[in-house]
Image (tube, grey):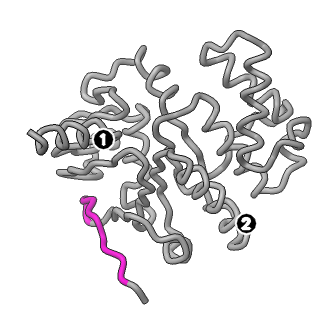
């Protein structure tokens, strides 16, 4: 009886589950026969050379590419049956951080954040203001809300992008090369922010080709190579 209860508990903690998945870019097979799971509270790296399929994999998870073969489930959404009208609801349960920040240049940080909340159904202005202050504080940017993106450094912009990903209290944060445009020291600072968010209980899946960061902040690591994704074991140096 105890074993059954343990099994049920474990299943409920799976945030992402893929079985025998193939991922395509148009008609080109990018990844084949992918089976993996990510559990609640994990920090998982996805590594691989440029062109190995990391971005296509990420895009499939947040509904930018359709899942045409295999079975996939992410934050209680079935990727096989995902319809166009479901995608905004899926993305409310995901936080996505991009390499190039994707902040709106024509408005302040506060107005960038407000735009996201209004677009995802928030209406109460007091709650909107409080939520913006809360996420900016989490990434050490509480005093920067009045600034425009171009007035911030690359590291500061990426912290803002992470704060934006936290706005709707996501079950999973997908970070696609979040340190790709940053110098090594700034990359470490951004990683410390992500680590703190993970320690607070959030699940993070991060694509990167920065092996120095993985050595400095070791965690479960998946590798894209030869049209496959497999877990690699980190060995102590």
Foreground pick, 155 / 198: 198
- Inspect the magenta stretch and tell me whether residue 228 lies in it: yes
- Asked if residue 169 lies left or right of residue 136, the reply is left
The residue that label 2 is drawn on is 186
Work out whether 24 lies above or below 208: above
- Asked if residue 155 lies left or right of residue 32, the reply is right
Q: CA distance from mark 1 to mark 2?
A: 32 Å
Magenta span: 226-235
Residue 74 seen by the camera: yes
Residue 216 place in picture, x, y as percent: 55, 76
Residue 69 seen by the camera: no
Q: Tell me the SS state at disc 1.
A: strand
The residue that label 1 is drawn on is 14
| Residue drawn at 40 percent across, 66 percent down | 48
| Residue drawn at 60 percent across, 18 percent down | 120
Which tag is nearer the camera, tag 1 or tag 2? Answer: 1
Q: Looking at the image, is mark 1 or mark 2 earlier in the sequence? A: 1
- Asked if residue 31 lies left or right of residue 126, the reply is left
Residue extending farthest to the top is 123
Residue 118 place in picture, x, y as percent: 69, 16
Residue extending farthest to the front is 2
| Residue drawn at 76 percent across, 49 percent down | 157
Q: Tell me the SS state at disc 2.
A: helix
């Amino acid at each position: 009886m105890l074993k059954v209860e343990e099994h049920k508990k474990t299943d409920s903690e799976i945030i992402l589950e893929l079985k025998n998945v193939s991922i395509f870019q148009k008609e080109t097979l990018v990844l084949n026969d992918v089976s993996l799971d990510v559990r609640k509270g994990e920090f998982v790296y996805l590594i691989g050379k440029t062109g190995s399929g990391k971005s296509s994999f990420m895009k499939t998870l947040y509904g930018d590419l359709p899942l045409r073969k295999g079975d996939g489930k992410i934050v209680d959404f079935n990727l096989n049956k995902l319809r166009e009208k479901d995608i905004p609801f899926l993305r409310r349960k995901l936080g996505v951080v991009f390499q190039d920040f994707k902040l709106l240049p024509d408005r302040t940080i506060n107005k960038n954040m407000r735009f996201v909340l209004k677009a995802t159904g928030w209406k109460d202005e007091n709650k909107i203001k409080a939520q913006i202050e809360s996420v900016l504080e989490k990434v050490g940017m509480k005093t920067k809300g009045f600034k425009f993106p171009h007035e911030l450094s690359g590291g500061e912009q990426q912290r803002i992008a992470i704060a934006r990903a936290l706005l709707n209290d996501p079950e999973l944060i997908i970070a696609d090369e979040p340190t790709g445009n940053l110098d090594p020291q700034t990359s470490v600072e951004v990683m410390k922010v992500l680590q703190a968010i993970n320690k607070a209980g959030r699940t993070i899946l991060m694509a990167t080709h920065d092996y120095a960061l993985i050595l400095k902040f070791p965690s479960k690591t998946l590798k894209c190579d030869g049209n496959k994704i497999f877990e690699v074991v980190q060995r102590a140096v």
